[in-house]
Amino acid sequence: MTPNADYYIAIDRSKRLAEDPGTGHNRWHPAIPPILTVDEGEVVALEARDAFDGQIKPGMHARDAAGFNVNRIHPMTGPVWVNGAEPGDILEVHVTAVEPGSSGFTIQGPKFGFLRDIYSDDFVVHWKINDGVATSEDLPGIRIPGAPFMGVMGVAPSHDLMNIIHRREAELKRCGGSVSLPNADAAVPGAGDIARDGLISMPPREFAGNMDIKQLSAGARVRIPVYVPGALFSTGDGHFAQGDNECCTAVEMAATLFCSFRVIKGEARRRGIDHVEFTREDYHTTAELAAPRRFYATTGLPISRDGENRSEDLNLSARNALIHMIDYLIDAYGMTRQQALVICSVAVDLRISQAVNMPNYLVSAFLPTDIFSDR
């Protein structure tokens, strides 16, 4: 049943964002004009395109999907001006519902992802979404239960914050970091300061953005510091299901977010908050999925393949736990390495099991075995 909404923003998903002007953007910038003004408590429905702006078509082969333009990623619907929101406040976003599309995809390759140095070939899985479950001919025997959420929710940065981000990300790029600096290619809006200086949407930042937190399904309350008058909230990047690691992509889909807003006056300034917080009073999915009854787990230590022990390196521990899970999936279920990585991205949860026993902090990877329909 479709929830009631005081305002409904519809888009034409048969068109890419650049062909449907006035409904959204794919850069973060404070000068992007709002498409809607709302009061606290009013419910807004925002239709959104998939994260790749329709570039990955159903049935598309990996060799064709590999040609996507990364600068088109994250077409967002918005911004929404929230009356009463001012810099120094907190904008609390109450996620009422996330309506999924009827199809989705998961894609991997050398352009992004936790193990992109190992997975140099492109691979795509196409999903059918029906009755709360995603299935795919590319992964026979797998059923992924859904817990839809929006990967991208955020507010506009101020000019001052945007300048700080420009400087620090340029320095990170100079030092060899994996950073996408501002560029006008495929930017929407496509001209002027917004196209030239707008922040690429790939990483999350102080004002939220591409957080990809699977617990932000219906019922979540997301608290974001406000940096500009009206907050200027936007959303996109619907996810049907995702593991707590998303090492390539989630089950990506078009989706519709239903939400309302509350302004907590002066709270960001009072507490010095420059980060996102969130809360909820129920499970983010069914209890059986939130804490799987049946699972198989692997572990990882901060020891490299050549035997070097790296002290307190949680990144290496997480990497090893994930690689061990991939090896297990290949051995136990006869998967290819690329199929196994998809399962890890959409269903496996990485957990820091301990960060006290120096030098070897330990990470565990949990696979819910109920996703296998023959088990």
Image (spheres, grey):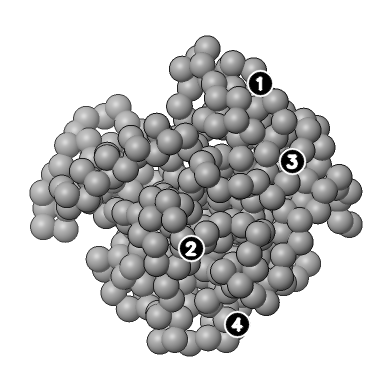
Q: Which residue is mark 2?
A: 190
Image quadrant holding the C terminus, namely: bottom right
Q: Which residue is mark 1?
A: 264
Q: Which residue is mark 4?
A: 58
Q: Residue 161 sits in which quadrant?
A: top left
Q: CA distance from mark 1 to mark 4?
A: 43 Å
Q: CA distance from mark 2 to mark 1?
A: 34 Å
Q: Does dot 2 land on a helix, a strand or a loop?
A: loop
* Residue type indicated by callout 3: Thr
Asked whether the residues under the numbered discs 3 and 4 touch, taking CB atoms below 8 Å apart as contact, a structural biologist would say no
Q: Residue at x 40, y 87 (%)?
A: 63
Residue 175 in the image: state x and y as whole percent. 15, 47
Residue 143 seen by the camera? no
Q: Does dot 4 land on a helix, a strand or a loop?
A: loop
Q: Residue at x 48, y 87 (%)?
A: 61
Mark nearest the camera among 1 and 3 is 3
* Residue type indicated by callout 2: Gly
Between discs 3 and 4, the one toward the N terminus: 3
* Residue type indicated by callout 4: Pro
Task: Judge left or right: residue 345 versus residue 2.
Answer: left
Between discs 3 and 2, the one toward the N terminus: 3
Q: Residue 264 sits in which quadrant?
A: top right
Q: Which residue is mark 3?
A: 37
Using the image as rendered, state which of residue 81 and residue 64 is in the foreground.
81
